[in-house]
Amino acid sequence: MLTSLSKSLRVNLPKVILLLILSGLVILGAVPGYLSGGKWRWTSPPNVAALPELRSLKKDGIDLPNWQTIEKKQVQIGDHKWLYQELQDSTQTKASVLFFPQARSIDQPQVEWTDLEGSQGWKTDSYRQVQLDSITVEFHRAWTQNQTYAVMRWYAWTNGGHPAPLQWFVSDRLAQWQNRRSPWVAVSVLLPIEPLAEIEPHRTTLESLAQTVQSTLTNQVLRSNQQIWAY
């Protein structure tokens, strides 16, 4: 019995550690707000100050340095509308970016990647994570009968980005501790490639575009000097 218990603890230890970390973040986010304002911050967190910029992104997209926007439109993906931008650079390389910005202060990233893959009928493989300056992106291949893509995707927020919603949750909890929020945008960058071609040769092009998207989002959308409070 003791042996079985020991094995069970070893198997579940990562989950226990994760639970303790999340519990600690909740406490850290709540206690300062309670001490300063007389109520628990997690019951009434600050609103997202950048909501006007996020709404503008969903309607108008953004201008990306060194890339010309050929087309932009809203497209239905799952139950939500995303902003689609088709791009082209000076070498005639074409790419596209899909944006799904946070719409309300209470919205959290959830199933955006599942919705995107399902709506497009993609098959996917070759998943790996790539570190780019302040963000981590998921790099993989996606294809249909008609087209293959090299893809990088992540949730972008003010001071970073990551494909896993949990990473945004941690960032947002820490921001609430400082009387702020961490606005987010789901970003998927697509580069058309030859049918079922390897994606590694296209990594440099995608990395450059992903970094341009992140920096532009940070400077034009995700930062806001105005703090809005929920009472």
Image (cartoon, rainbow, N blue to C red):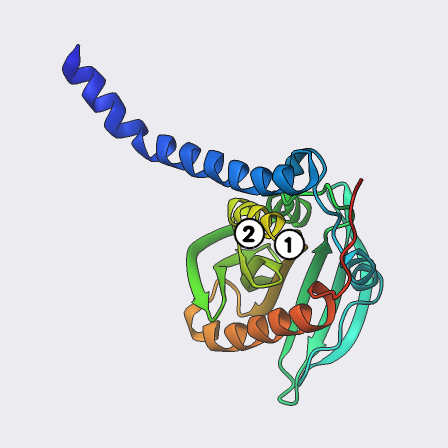
Residue 171 has which mark?
2
Q: Count neighbours of disc 1 (C-alpha within 10 A) and say few if under 14, some if 14 to 19, many if 20 or more.
A: many
Q: Is residue 163 left or right of residue 115?
A: left
Q: Residue at x 75, y 62 (%)?
A: 84
As drawn, 138 above or below 216:
above
Instruction: Give the residue pinned by disc 1.
Output: 182
Q: Amino acid at mark 1?
A: Ser
Q: Quadrant of the C terminus?
A: top right
Q: Residue at x 43, y 54 (%)?
A: 127
Would you say the residues marked 1 and 2 are in contact, meaning their CB atoms lie under 8 Å apart? Answer: yes
Percent position (x, y) of residue 100?
71, 54
Residue 194 has which mark?
none
Q: CA distance from mark 1 to mark 2?
A: 7 Å
**Residue 193, image quadrant:** bottom right
Q: Amino acid at mark 2?
A: Ser
Q: Quadrant of the N terminus?
A: top left
**Residue 18, image quadrant:** top left
How many numbered circles are shown? Answer: 2
Percent position (x, y) of residue 52?
83, 59
Percent position (x, y) of residue 208?
54, 77
User: Which of marks 2 and 1 precedes in the sequence?
Assistant: 2
The residue closer to the viewer here, 70 or 143, is: 70
Task: Look at the numbered disc 1 and give the secondary structure of its residue.
Answer: loop
Q: Is residue 15 left or right of residue 176?
A: left
Task: Look at the numbered disc 2 and give the secondary structure of its residue.
Answer: helix
